[in-house]
Image (cartoon, rainbow, N blue to C red):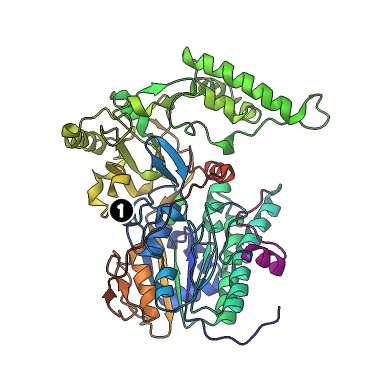
Amino acid sequence: MERRERTELSTALVGIDAACHGVLDPLVEAGAVPNIADLLANGASGPLESGIPPWTPSAWPSLYTGTNPGKHGVFDFLSFEGYDWDVVNATDVDERPLWGHLDRHGRSSVVVNVPVTHPPEEFDGALVPGYVAPEDPDCHPAGLLDDLRDALGGYRVYPDDVPGDEAQRREYARVARSRGEAFRYLVDRFDPDFGFVEFQVTDTVFHDRPGDQAAVRAVYEAVDEQIGKIREECDPDTVVLASDHGMGRYRGREFRVNEFLRDSGDVTAVRGGDGMPTWATVRDGQLKQGASEPGDGASGGADADATAGGVAATAMAGLARVGLTSQRIGRALEAVGLADAVAERVPSSVVSAGTAQVDFPASRAYVRSRIECGVRINLQGREPAGVVPPDEYEAVRDDLIERLSAVRTPEGDPVFEDVARREAYFEGPHVDRAVDVVTVPTAFDHFLSARLAGSQFGDPTEPWNHKRDGVVAVAGDGVDEAAALGDAHLYDVAPTVLATMGVPAAERMDGTVLPAVDPVGERRYPDYDRHSAATADGDVEDRLANLGYIE
């Protein structure tokens, strides 16, 4: 690609989803990530404490706005209106992003693959959305995606599913490389002052291929190669490397909070597919649609399968109403070693129809989504069919906090390191969107599940889990690379990036400039307002289910 003369990129923010010392240190020791190793060793670096909840949809907006979810408004992959839900998008983020602040100061930006940035708003520069965007997202400026695909010979938001271990590893690495290629192409084309590129597949690989260390290494080698090329070709004055959270193995139990609440009479269950949430059944990633293979003697193809699935779903719903739920059938199949074989052929719609589900309107308190890390109270005047009177709200919260704080695993270990009112973690105009009681698992070693499965405890559905500590490194002009960053928090990244460019932080930001960079003060910025829009993309919901984020 022919390059043109351009001005310097002032600051490059490199986001690596789920990066932490537990993941990086073995790769650094093996010599697999020399560019990341250089930033960690020669820049100011340290662990980066994530927020609550430490998951992609709330953590990245916290990073790029410098605010807690109570201010920016995103707590989960899902947004709720009463008992209904939609997948979150950028219009749910109610705080100005980094590139919006820079735009007000006459600085241009290029933003590539950052989660929860679709649909984009107008600003001086370019944006290609990342995670939770559709595969063919709107970009800024309009038509940019076609230009990018023409220039690079293709570009995907999500990796393809490819048969074969080695082929899938190559696909992950290809997607990682494409982020750096897209970023460098756009920096060359738009000549920005600031650049932000995020690598998501570093998280995805742990959910898709748990235990596949060869895939993890392949992904990180590709990411590291791109970081080296960005530093060489874009030549930023300052580089900030940051992750939204860490990653590690579960070492505890799966705790099914709604089963605990059902046993105490707080949750009411309904069978037959009529309850809410309708997605809380069995992960789509564990149930393959039973399409006919050529030559297997079946007739009718996909249409016949769909019809059969509908008939089977109706039958399964009828069985569930008399007590024969999918959970009971699943336990019986597990006992005789047939669960996996049956799951390969049973449509998820059939399983959904036969699954006991939380009846939101009839329950006193419940977990809506495990990603929220907490319990919601069915409060009168707030929820459409609230059953808890407002004058009993605090007493119900106290009761839940006391009982959940006392929960122990069958081995006698505490499930939670903290159970608290939401006000202990969130502050701002959107606190009411948060759970009423925040539940923080001990060291995030226990898997919190919203599903009803007949018992309170089990083995973790996911073998790997997000951890609270990510990583941060700052290197370049004007950086005190000997500064200690032991107390760095996710909210500190945005004000630090602004300070590297001589731009004051917003007064509303919850973070402070990291000690490696000289602060340039704060100022009050005009209110930020975005018009909301629905996501309405079934493929996005399927991806979240396949990764275990939606149960």
Q: In the displayed structure, would residue 470 be above or below residue 8?
A: above
- Work out which residue is located at the far top of the displayed protein and give it: 322
Q: What element carries label 1?
A: helix
Q: Nearer the viewer, residue 171 or 33?
A: 171
Residue 277 belongs to the span the image colors magenta: no
Q: Quadrant of residue 275?
A: top left
Q: Which of 421 and 44 is in front in this view?
A: 421
Q: In the displayed structure, would residue 148 be above or below residue 4?
A: above
Which residue matches tag 1?
A: 70
Q: Where is residue 88 in the image (x, y as percent from the top left)?
A: 46, 49
Q: Position of residue 175 (x, y in %)?
A: 63, 60
Tell me where the magenta segment starts and ends, as one range: 144-161
Q: Position of residue 18 (x, y in %)?
A: 47, 58
Q: Is disc 1 surrounded by few (<14), some (14 to 19) or many (20+) residues within 10 Å? A: many
Q: Is residue 252 visible?
A: no
The mark tally for this picture is 1
Q: Is residue 270 visible?
A: yes
Q: Quadrant of residue 32?
A: bottom right
The N terminus sits in image quarter = bottom right
Q: Where is residue 281 in the image (x, y as percent from the top left)?
A: 50, 31
- Work out which residue is located at the far right of the displayed protein and give it: 295
Q: Nearer the viewer, residue 390 or 265?
A: 390
Left or right: 300 with respect to 537? Answer: right
- Tell me what residue is drawn at x 70 percent, y 62 percent: 154
In the image, what residue type sits under mark 1?
A: Gly
Q: In the displayed structure, would residue 354 be above or below residue 15?
A: above
- Tell me what residue is drawn at x 40 percent, y 74 percent: 104
Q: In the displayed structure, would residue 158 be above or below residue 6?
A: above
Q: Which of 128 and 43 is in front in this view?
A: 128
